[in-house]
Image (tube, helix red, strand yellow):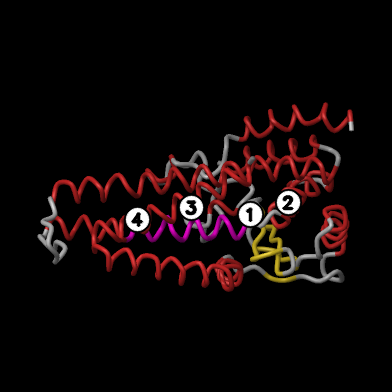
Amino acid sequence: MEVFKTVFLMVALTLLFIFIGGVYGGSNGMLIALMITGIMNFVSYFFSDKMVLSHYNAVQVTQKEAPGLYQIVKNLSQKAKIPMPKIYIIPDKIPNAFATGRNPSHAAVAVTEGILDLLNENEIEGVLGHELSHVKHYDILTGTITATIAGAIAWIANIMQWGAIFGAYRDDEQDDNPIVMILLAIILPIAATIIQMSISRSREYAADEGSAKITGHPQWLQSGLRKLENYNEQGLVQGATETTSHMFIINPFTGKNISFASLFSTHPSTEDRIQRLEELKTKIIKQ
């Protein structure tokens, strides 16, 4: 059901992007929007992991350099039945973690120095079980593509708004109403953000459940989430952007009121996630 919901929302987001191209540029605009979507998805598929790891100054580590972390990831990968991902450490004292990569064979998990200092071994296992669940179900690729398209919609809508204000309308048989254009430029990015948020939240719940099943101990992730939520309000991961916030296990901007966009959280509330994990305990015990 979650997979069907995700596919449906991604199609809706793509169609929304094409619709904006049609509103602003007619049939040619729709074609251009479709081509842009294809190019963005291609770039996201092959290069998003390298770009985000570079952005956060992540450093790849080996078994010799981080034996404990390496062993946890190795054990979890075997349980999840996926290839061993590359492991990176981000030189940042704010505790957080994310996974990236286009598929399980080209994946990486990244953790900050802060999360290694804050959480115990079981809690780290719960967090990494969540991230490897994302890897197993191709959530990173899904999240990257949706974030890219949503960002492009916001960019085009901004052009529409200024074009309407200064009279740069479409040059075809129809006259564009500048008021309608401005309203669309405001409403459409909000709609795109809501769709992106729905996709991201859906996958976060699924990854939490995946962690519980891989580790067999939902309480490990519960405890880790509580600590991360409490600490997250004390600082911000260096270089964090709202474009990449969906990747982290805890949204870096939660509770900081940095911008209006942060109100549209890519993550469910931590309390809701903990409650769902609580409900999973009984199911796992029965199994």
- The 10 Å Cα crowd at callout 2, few under 14, some 14 to 19, many 20 or more, is many
Of helix, strand and loop, which one carries label 1? helix
Give the residue type that dot 2 points to: Ser
Which residue appears at 69% of the width and 54% of the height? 137
Point out the frontmost of discs 3 and 2. 3
The residue carrying mark 4 is 154
Of the two numbered discs 4 and 2 on the same chain, state the one appearing first in sequence: 2
| N-term-proximal mark, 1 vs 3 | 3
Q: Quadrant of the C terminus?
A: top right
Marks 3 & 4, CB-CB < 8 Å contact:
no
Q: Which residue is mark 1?
A: 139
User: Disc 4 to disc 2, how far (Cα)?
Assistant: 30 Å
Marks 2 and 1: in contact by CB < 8 Å? yes
Query: Which residue occupies the foreground of this view, 170 or 67?
Result: 170
Secondary structure mainly formed by the magenta segment? helix
Q: Which mark is residue 11?
A: 3
Q: Which residue is mark 2?
A: 133
Q: Tell me which amino acid carries mark 4.
A: Ala
